[in-house]
Image (spheres, rainbow, N blue to C red):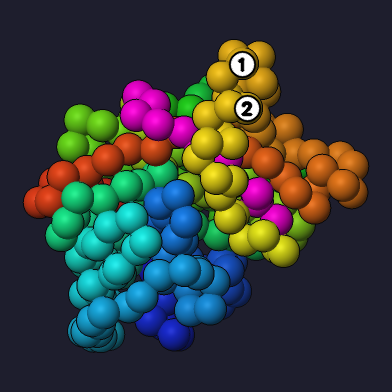
Amino acid sequence: MLKWKLSKNLVSELYNNNGANFIHPWGLETADSWSFFSLEKGVGYRYSLLGESIEKQEKVLTQHLDIQFKEGRFSLVHKDQLDDKVIIRESDLIARSDSVFMDFVQRYRFKKEFFEYALIAGQKIVHTNSNVYHQFPVKEVVLKGTDLTIRISIDKVETANKFTPTMYVRDRGDEWIVHVRMIPSNDEFMVIKLCSRYFKTSPLPQWLTSAILFFPTIRNALRYRTERSPYKSRLMNFFAPNAFPMVRLKCGERLSWKSKLEVL
């Protein structure tokens, strides 16, 4: 039977039968060209929280949020529910004005020490601290350990017919990161963001982005660049330019996730 600890309105600890906490705090994320929202307090930037209400019970945590981005506004309802060997996570986003989105993500994080490898899309991923996003349009990821094996899977998804549901597993530092992630199905437009701690994914001016991405070779090289192959040099890591496709949602359009974690 699983037991959890809720802290700062997150699932912050999760205990197996041996009484060991095998996760780092989970979250939820989305972004436009400028703004970045995360359920983890102090992680996001360039957005305003217009309203928030929390319903906390022993085995259910529900959050209602109203978020203002630079390029739109949306409401968000997120629920985590604990049930013996399963945790169900439901996230529902509704655009409250015409808005721009880069993705919509449920974030899972696990301590490296509990899992020897990950399985995704028929591939076995060993932790080498590569920080590569092993991302595929699949419905499940399995983390395998000597004493603990878990599966993260997608139950339901709603994409407004503009996103592709994907999952990825990432080996970074002392953790495994698993994302349940929507990415744009078509490039309505693209931005180049500088993805470092200093720039905090600040975008280049759109006229400059358009000029740079006019060349297909450069566009393909910069597309999700650090996710596929992290920069090696200090200079490139300082700027870390990445090109991201973006999607426009009309007021009233909806994105939603239902995923779950199971102990196998």
Residue drawn at point x = 58 percent, y = 55 percent: 202
Kindly identify which residue carries mark 2.
212
Mark 1 residue type: Phe
In the rendered image, residue 218 lying in the magenta stretch gets the answer no
Q: Does any portion of residue 85 appear in the rendered image? A: no
Q: For this view, does 25 lie left or right of residue 28?
A: right
- In percent of width and height, residue 262 lies at 39, 53
Provide the residue designation for mark 1: 215
Q: Position of residue 228 (x, y in %)?
A: 66, 31
Q: Residue furthest left?
A: 252
Q: Quadrant of the N terminus?
A: bottom left
Residue 250 image label: none
Q: Callout 2: helix, strand or loop?
A: helix
Tell me the SS state at disc 1.
loop
Q: Around disc 2, counting alpha carbons within 10 Å, would you say few (fewer than 14), some (14 to 19), or many (20 or more)?
A: some
Residue drawn where x is 46% and y is 61% of the image: 36
Indicate left or right for 145 with 181 as reference: right
Query: Magenta span covers which residues?
Result: 186-196
User: Looking at the picture, how far across and down is residue 115, in whole percent?
Assistant: 65, 51
Residue at the front extreme? Answer: 207
Which quadrant holds residue 53? bottom left
Q: Is residue 218 left or right of residue 107?
A: right
- Name above or below for residue 53 compared with residue 23: below
**Residue 242 at x, y percent in the picture:** 62, 38
The residue lying at 28 percent from left, 57 percent from top is 72
Query: How many numbered tags mark residues here?
Result: 2
Q: Is residue 98 visible?
A: yes
Q: Marks 1/2: CA distance?
A: 6 Å
User: Are circles 1 and 2 on residues that touch, CB within 8 Å?
Assistant: yes
* Residue 103 placement: quadrant: top left
Please state which amino acid type lies under the numbered disc 2.
Ile
Q: Residue at x 80, y 48 (%)?
A: 237
